Every structure is written in C-alpha cells, then in structure tokens.
Image (spheres, grey):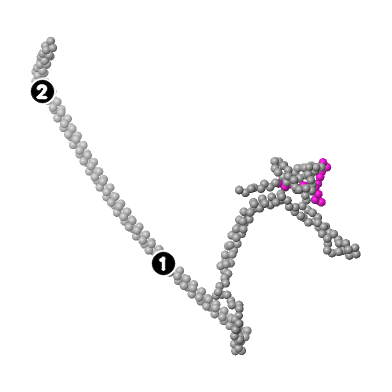
Amino acid sequence: MEEVVQVPKTYSVFRNADESIIIDEEGYITCQTDSGLTFKIQTSEIDSNGPPITCTVDNEEVLIVLTSTHRTIDTPDTNISNQENQEPNVIQHNFEIFTWNDANTKIFLSLYKEKKELVGSRRIKNFKEIAPILMPVSTTTVLPTTSNVERREEPEDMPVADESEVVTVPENANLVAVAKKRIATETTAKALQQCQEEMQEYRKTLEKRHENQDKMLSQILETYKSIKDRQEEHLTAIENHRKETIQQRQRRNHLLEEKNNLLKEFLNSFKKINQCDVATLLFTNKTGGSGTISSKASSSDDKSDSDSDSKM
C-alpha cells in the first residue's frame, strides 16, 4: 500500500513593491489564499526571515511562506565606463529565484504520483494517433532491397572508353528518352495484361457464383414443390377421412333411432300384455275366488286353535 502524502494549503503574505512583508499599525501580518480567504498573524510570534510555518485554520493545516521568492543579484558589467578611475559599473538585475523546501518537495511528489499514470496513457495515446499517419507512409514508400539498391562503389578495373564509344550529350539524352519510353510502354503493357487477366478471373468467379445461385434456387424450388404435393396429399386424405367419419356418424344415429323405436314398441306391447293379465286376474277373483278365500281363513283359524291347546 502506497502512503498518501497530504499536502497542506499554501498561503501568501501581503508584500509591497520591494517584496517586504507589510505590517499594519497593530503589528499584524495579513495572509491570503487563492480562494480569497484572509487572516492575520502577530509579528511577535513569527520570524519573517525564517522557514515556512504551519498553522491550523478552519480545522485545516496550512503552510505560510514568509521568505520572498525574488532576490536581487549584483552582477558587475564587463564594460568599464570610467577608465580613469578603473571602477566597474555595478548594474542591479532582478532575477526570480525559486526557494526549494520540504513543502515544495511534498507538493511535487504528490503531483507526480497523481499525474504519473496520466503521462503514460498520454504517451500511448500519442502512439495511437501517430500509427494511422505512419501506415500509409510505410506502404507507399519503397523499402531498400538487394535488387533495387544502386552500386555506389565502382570497380577498380574500369574499362577505358574509346573515341568510337564516346557518346555526346544530345545522343545521351536521346538514348535516355528512348529508354524511358520503352520502359513506360513495357510497364503499361504489363499493367494492361495484368488488368485483363484479373478481369477474366473476376468474370469467371462471377459466372461460377451465378451458376451456384441458379442451382441452389432450382433445388429450393424442387423441394418446395415436393413439400406442396405432400401437403396436398395429406389434405385430401384428411378430407376423405372426415367424410367417412361423417357417414359413419349418420349411420350410427340412424341405427340408434331404429333401436329407440323398437324399444318403444316393445314397451307398449308389454304394457298391453300386463293390462290384459291384470284384467283376467280381477275377473277370476270376482267369480270363484271367494270360496277359496273362506276356506283359507278357516284353515288359519284351526291352526291358531291347535297352537293354543298345545301351549296349555
């Protein structure tokens, strides 16, 4: 774990044009921050020429720098204006000297710790911004190879040109122009040939692509037709099955109606038969059934008498 350095706030002291501390009539020194907060300190409690002091203001530790950052250094002029007296002229130059102390060191270290990561990220950001600029340069520039490097060192045994081999300046210019034209025509012819070959290859690839697309479309259509035929067959089979089920349902309903009619007829006939039997029974009871009933009653009386005698 890194230790966090707490840097106290710095307060400046009111000074005059000569960079001396201003002391009011009551003997106080006025201090002020960048935000505008001011307070006073008794001069008897501090040493104006001593090191910075720390004090507590609003529950915060503050640093008050008493020494001035401006000093005058006397530098002798090299040019001697008065040669008779041999006395150099002394010119006063006002140089600003920054006094370094522990508080400044702490501030610097704390700022360095805070900004260290930002500096690294900024460097990476600069590399990222430079990369797209360098890429086209590296692609367009011709890198040196063994084939295109010129031979700068001449051989030791150079052949000496004869008078017949000496070429004048206009002839040399003409030869150079002819050579350039030949190179240009050769390069253009090669470029055209290469372009034609690339165009032919591109056409072939396009034709193959179109053929593959046509084959794929024909296969898709065939599969769609087969699926449609199967669907139609399935729908016809479903329709036939539906018709058969309707016919079977109608037959079943017809048979149920016939069955119900037969049951009704049977019940009616059974009721008629029962009515006839009841009528015959009533008729027989009215005619010869009285004697039998009386005989049955007498026999029951005899049985009751015999039972009573046996109990006695």
Q: Residue visible at 82% across and 57% down?
A: 74
Residue kind at label 2, given as amino acid type: Thr
Residue 68 image offset from top left, x and y in percent: 78, 51
Residue 166 image offset from top left, x and y in percent: 61, 87
Horizontal side, residue 40 vs residue 231: left or right: right
Q: Residue visible at 69% across and 50% down?
A: 106
Q: Tell me which corner region of the image, top left, top right, bottom left or bottom right, holds residue 39.
A: top right
- Name the mark on residue 114: none
Residue 92, compared with residue 285, is above or below; it is below
Q: Nearer the viewer, residue 144 or 98?
A: 98
The overriding secondary structure of the stretch rendered in magenta is: loop
Q: Image quadrant for the C terminus?
A: top left
Q: Which residues are magenta?
A: 9-26
Instruction: Report the Cα–Cα distance between label 2 and label 1.
Output: 114 Å
Residue kind at label 1, given as amino acid type: Lys
- Chain-order first, disc 2 or disc 1: 1
Residue where numbered disc 2 is placed:
284
- Secondary structure under the numbered disc 2 in the rendered image: helix
Residue 123 image offset from top left, x and y in percent: 62, 58
Taking the magenta stretch, the answer to whether it contains residue 256 is: no
- Secondary structure under the numbered disc 1 in the rendered image: helix
